[in-house]
Amino acid sequence: MNRKTVALAFAGASLFAIAAAQAAEVTVWCWDPNFNVAIMKQAGEIYAKTHPDFKLNVVDFAKADLEQKLQTGLASGVADGMPDIVLIEDYGAQKYLQSFPDSFAPLSDKVDYSGFADYKVKLATLDGKVYSMPFDSGVAGMFYRKDMITAAGYTPADMQDLTWDKYVEIGKAVEAKTGKKMMGFDPNDGGLVRVLMQSAGGWYFDKDGKLSVEGNVALKGALDVIQKIQVNNIFRPAAGWADWVGSFTSGEVATVVTGVWITGTVKSQADQSGKWGVAPLPKLSVEGATHYSNLGGSSWYVLSGSKAKDESIDFLNEIYAKDINFYQKILVDRGAVGSLLAARNGEAYKSNDAFFGGEPIWQNFSDWLAKVPSVNYGTFTNEVDSVVSAHQPDLAKGTSVDDVLKAIDAQAQTLVQ
């Protein structure tokens, strides 16, 4: 089937669904009123312009409440009271797909996935079928304070193509010259380990979904960096999310290593405009390492028992898989970087950001998005992550990385059985 035939097939499927979409009401479950909820409502308003009978009911939950309600509903096998579309964080996708087979509608024959970031598509692929409409990306980068880096004797050019050893070296210089720490870091949060591990194409599980701790080169490299950050004391300790955010909004640290979704928070301090830059991640010193990774992100799923399944799929396909202008709006309005690669050709993505000294940060993030290594998040990412987080303080005490890996492996084995 050539490209033109494929396009006609997708167009035909959409027209069919449009004809069937009379007076449909689609219910969506998601979390975060200022991001996911607001964006979904925006998508519904756009779709309704060409589908006047379409009605969208977006239900806002706390994330933990949504996950509990979804789990309970799927386990009961009763479709009544369930949504037509639900938002699932990427880390939990395989757990739902494998634990509740046939509960989600495969979209492989409806959506052209060749236009999405490959790693997002593979996260929702099971037995050759893709089940999600990829949504926001957590493509990661390193935000850095130009003024602090310059005071330490380095330039923005020095922040490109870094290794983590060089990052630690710069961190020492920053503190010596400015009294500031290099990053805010919560020893009880495993987010940075996940960023580092995926940048080298590794995860807690191998490509077949089997637990991979001891002998995992990417995980070992990540923990080695975590130990160097702590032993060299280049971090400002953070106790929880709010304290971590405060470490950089208050100007106490020189860098922030995390997902693109933090951009709006960084920009919330108007008095820091022009002082920040963004660079690719430092690279691990292991085979397969890259400057690209991801933290967080989520995707939309259609319940197979939905009475508005065809309408739901058509709605997602028309807006999230095709509407480039929609992605420009949610980038400007919400700071959302979608995973549809064609969106980066839009005007909003090409714009320069004065807060970051005129850097084209959205274009940079979207370019990095296409280079994020694909990994298998498996079915127990959150469980293993809690074990890894619990052992990060051991690294600060000087326990060897190999011994920490053994301890993590022993505990994780009991969780995934």
Image: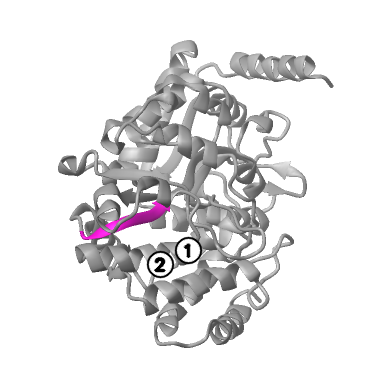
Q: Are marks 1 and 2 in contact (CB under 8 Å)?
A: yes
Quadrant where the image shows the C terminus: bottom right
Residue 55 can be seen, yes or no: no
Image coords of residue 134 (percent x, y): 56, 38
Q: In the visual, does 214 lie left or right of 385?
A: right
Quadrant where the image shows the N terminus: top right
Which residue is tagged 1? 164
Q: In the visual, does 126 lie left or right of 172?
A: right
What's the residue at 51%, 48% (across, down)?
Answer: 88
Q: In the visual, does 243 lie left or right of 107?
A: left
Assess disc 2: are there few (<14), some (14-19) or many (≥20) residues with their C-alpha within 10 Å of its C-alpha: some
Query: Mark 1 and mark 2: span between their CA atoms?
Result: 6 Å
Mark 2: secondary structure? helix
Q: Nearer the viewer, residue 39 or 252?
A: 252
Amino acid bearing label 2: Val
The residues colored magenta run 252-259
Assess disc 1: are there few (<14), some (14-19) or many (≥20) residues with their C-alpha within 10 Å of its C-alpha: many
What's the residue at 64%, 55% (across, down)?
Answer: 375
Image coords of residue 295 (percent x, y): 47, 53
What's the residue at 57%, 45% (across, down)?
Answer: 79
Q: Nearer the viewer, residue 21 or 5?
A: 5
Q: Nearer the viewer, residue 166 or 278?
A: 166
Which residue is tagged 2? 168
Mark 1: secondary structure? helix
